[in-house]
Image: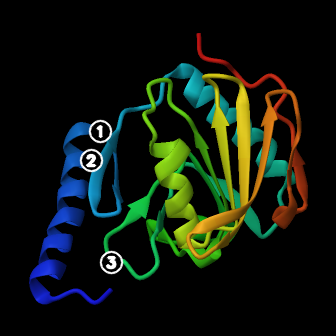
Amino acid sequence: MTLTSPERTSMTRLRKAAEAAEEASGLRAEIIRGVLMMSPTPRGKHAQAINDLYDRLRPALPEHLRPFQVASVRLPDDPDDYATPDLLVCDAGFGQSDDWLVDPADAELVVEVVSKSNSTKDTRDMVEWYADAGIPAYLLVDPRDGTWILYTVPREGEFQGRRRGKFGEDVEIPGLGLTLSTEGFPLYG
């Protein structure tokens, strides 16, 4: 999509608004399909699930990859759209850069933990967004019902692969050649 000058100015204002809102409120801002979305700080069990995932991913990853919390990935061909997954696995060198946006071509896996009050952002909207971005794997962990879904093989805005499981069942992430345990993941009360 080619943006005209007024459209580009509007989009730039949206990115500035997202940054200002994040700074003023402490909430996490994202721009998804041109819509500014704000997310509250995760609750304890949500944060614990993210920590558990990080702790299990970090030692299992090849040396050149690392999981990052609160790192954002941009949508290709859109100057303003970006998402901030709960975890993002990409080249370890990202941790040495001053950049805040990861190129989706450098991302290997994104992980979202569904919030207790989540509408459909993680379970529907982000599935399409991450597929459009070409992210090779999207792991959706849902403490509301103790399930997970691994989406793989993005093509033309859709993930071709989908594998479902329950907490306690391992997740095999083929592109990374690792198996992730979901034993003991917290459930919302």
Q: Residue at x 19, y 42 (%)?
A: 24
Amino acid marked by disc 3: Pro
Q: Residue at x 75, y 65 (%)?
A: 65
How far apart are labels 3 and 1 at the CA level? 23 Å
Q: Is residue 41 above or below residue 76?
A: above
In the picture, the quarter occupied by the N terminus is bottom left
Secondary structure of residue under mark 3: loop
Q: Residue at x 36, y 77 (%)?
A: 78
Residue 170, horizontal then vertical, whole percent: 89, 39
Crowdedness of circle 1 by 10 Å Cα count: few (<14), some, many (20+)?
few
- Reading the image, the residue beneath label 1 is 26
**Snapshot quadrant of residue 186:** top right
- Reading the image, the residue beneath label 2 is 22
Proximity of marks 2 and 3: CB atoms separated by less than 8 Å: no
Give the mark toward the camera: 2 or 3.
3
Residue 185, horizontal then vertical, whole percent: 74, 25
Q: Is residue 179 above or below residue 168?
A: below
Secondary structure of residue under mark 2: helix
Numbered circles on residues, count: 3
Amino acid marked by disc 2: Glu
- Reading the image, the residue beneath label 3 is 79
Proximity of marks 1 and 2: CB atoms separated by less than 8 Å: yes
